[in-house]
């Protein structure tokens, strides 16, 4: 979760006094600059005087800061920070993840300070503002086998997809974020995790918001369908003493489907995602034999299942990877139990929307293609 507030009292804040142009009696101000400042360096800060007329508040960005965290700390919004700092740091307007330690941001302004303008901001975080064209549930027909990494011909659309096959913290917070920001999404739950308390709550939200959420099948136990073994939350059902049979693969899919359908009212067929991305032709044949002909992989892997302590990515690294690499028809792999996923979404969603990319479901990407 976001933990910026714990460092609040230790971070430097500089109050910059703006003198009226006609003032003649105020003491002179001596600007302080860093040696060797070059292009892109923020305007010099000045020391406050005893007789201010109007004040702005600036903040020196620290390592690990995000624009969202700074907005929270100073009770403002990402959009307002972008507007205040557009001239000094124009990259913030189109990419909030471009924030760098050492920058000096305007984070507050007193009465009478002009509010700078910027290019139109993306849909605000957490307001539930509808996004034109986002939809889910228009499921593609089962006929015609295909394995998808990206969806060609999808236009300026990107699918943020979420697996639910293991850790489930902070799944509910992520779901509520998607609801609040009207992000249409395709989820791939396993049957086993769907039977947990949190999993049941997640699927209840899917049922309550069919306009936003659609589901695909992620099998019952998250076994490696090519080699056998692995699995979540238990490895026992996945021990097949050899290559899993077609009957085993079909049972993994049908058992999960009955749970998903009962909980959400949706039939996951023909959408499915093989656990670990592990498949071969016999696996595809077994899945197709019971209607699972649309196999969804991904073009951007966030690796959000891996904690930072084990070399996993930070929220800013996840967001930067997605925002930088997303193109028309991209499919992004995330997890409802991703360690930094919620914080990353708060960064990437406004940045992707600033690029005029529609965040929507796989069905929407496939519609008409």
Image (cartoon, grey):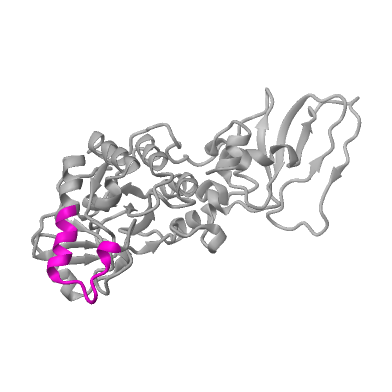
Q: Choose between 314 and 20: the one closer to the eye.
A: 314
Residue at horizontal 33 percent and vertical 34 percent from the top: 130
The magenta segment: 236-255
Q: Position of residue 213 (x, y in %)?
A: 26, 43
Report if residue 253 lies within the magenta region: yes
Q: Position of residue 345 (x, y in %)?
A: 45, 47
Does 145 sit above or below residue 51?
Answer: below
Report if residue 328 lies within the magenta region: no
Residue at horizontal 79 percent and vertical 32 percent from the top: 17
Residue at horizontal 20 percent and vertical 72 percent from the top: 244
Does 289 sit above or below residue 4?
Answer: below
Q: Is residue 20 left or right of residue 285?
A: right
Q: Main secondary structure of the magenta part?
A: helix
Confirm whether residue 274 shows in the render: no
Q: Is residue 208 left or right of residue 5?
A: left
Q: Choose between 102 and 51: the one closer to the eye.
A: 102
Dividing the picture into quarters, in which one does residue 224 lie? bottom left
Q: Position of residue 7 (x, y in %)?
A: 68, 41
Confirm whether residue 352 shows in the render: yes
Q: Is residue 169 left or right of residue 152?
A: right
Q: How many marks?
A: 0
Q: Position of residue 289 (x, y in %)?
A: 8, 65
Residue at horizontal 45 percent and vertical 55 percent from the top: 323
Dividing the picture into quarters, in which one does residue 109 lie? top right
Q: Is residue 290 left or right of residue 86?
A: left
Q: Choose between 277 and 165: the one closer to the eye.
A: 165
In the rendered image, the quadrant that contains the C terminus is bottom left
Does 180 sit above or below residue 260?
Answer: above
């Amino acid at each position: 979760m976001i933990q910026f507030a714990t460092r609040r009292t230790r971070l430097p804040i500089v109050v910059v006094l703006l003198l009226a142009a006609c003032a003649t009696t105020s003491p002179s101000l001596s600007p302080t600059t860093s040696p060797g400042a070059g292009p892109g360096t923020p305007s010099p800060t000045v020391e406050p005087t005893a007789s201010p007329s109007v004040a702005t508040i600036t903040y020196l960005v620290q390592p690990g800061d995000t624009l969202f965290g700074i907005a929270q700390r100073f009770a403002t919004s990402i959009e307002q920070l972008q507007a205040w700092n557009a001239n000094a740091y124009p990259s913030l307007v189109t990419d909030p993840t471009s924030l760098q330690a050492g920058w000096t941001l305007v984070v507050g302004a007193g009465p009478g300070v002009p509010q700078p303008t910027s290019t139109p901001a993306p849909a605000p975080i957490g307001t539930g503002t509808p996004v034109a064209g986002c939809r889910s549930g228009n499921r593609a027909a089962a006929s015609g086998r295909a394995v998808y990494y990206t969806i060609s011909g999808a236009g300026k659309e990107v699918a943020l997809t979420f697996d639910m096959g293991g850790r489930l913290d902070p799944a509910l917070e992520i779901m509520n974020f998607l609801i609040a920001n009207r992000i249409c999404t395709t989820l791939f739950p396993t049957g086993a995790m769907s039977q947990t308390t949190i999993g049941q709550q997640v699927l209840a939200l899917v049922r309550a918001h069919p306009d936003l959420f659609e589901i695909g099948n992620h099998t019952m136990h998250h076994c490696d369908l090519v080699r056998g073994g692995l699995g979540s939350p238990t490895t026992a059902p996945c021990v097949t003493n050899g290559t899993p049979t077609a009957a085993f693969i079909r049972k993994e899919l049908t058992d999960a489907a009955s749970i998903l359908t009962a909980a959400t009212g949706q039939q996951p067929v023909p959408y499915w995602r093989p656990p670990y991305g592990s498949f071969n032709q016999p696996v595809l044949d077994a899945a197709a034999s019971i209607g699972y002909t649309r196999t969804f992989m991904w073009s951007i892997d966030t690796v959000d299942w891996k904690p930072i302590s084990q070399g996993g990515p930070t929220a800013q690294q996840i967001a930067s990877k997605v925002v930088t690499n997303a193109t028309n028809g991209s499919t992004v792999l995330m997890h409802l139990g991703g360690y930094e996923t919620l914080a990353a979404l708060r960064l990437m969603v406004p940045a992707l929307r600033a690029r005029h990319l529609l965040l929507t479901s796989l069905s929407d990407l496939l519609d008409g293609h």
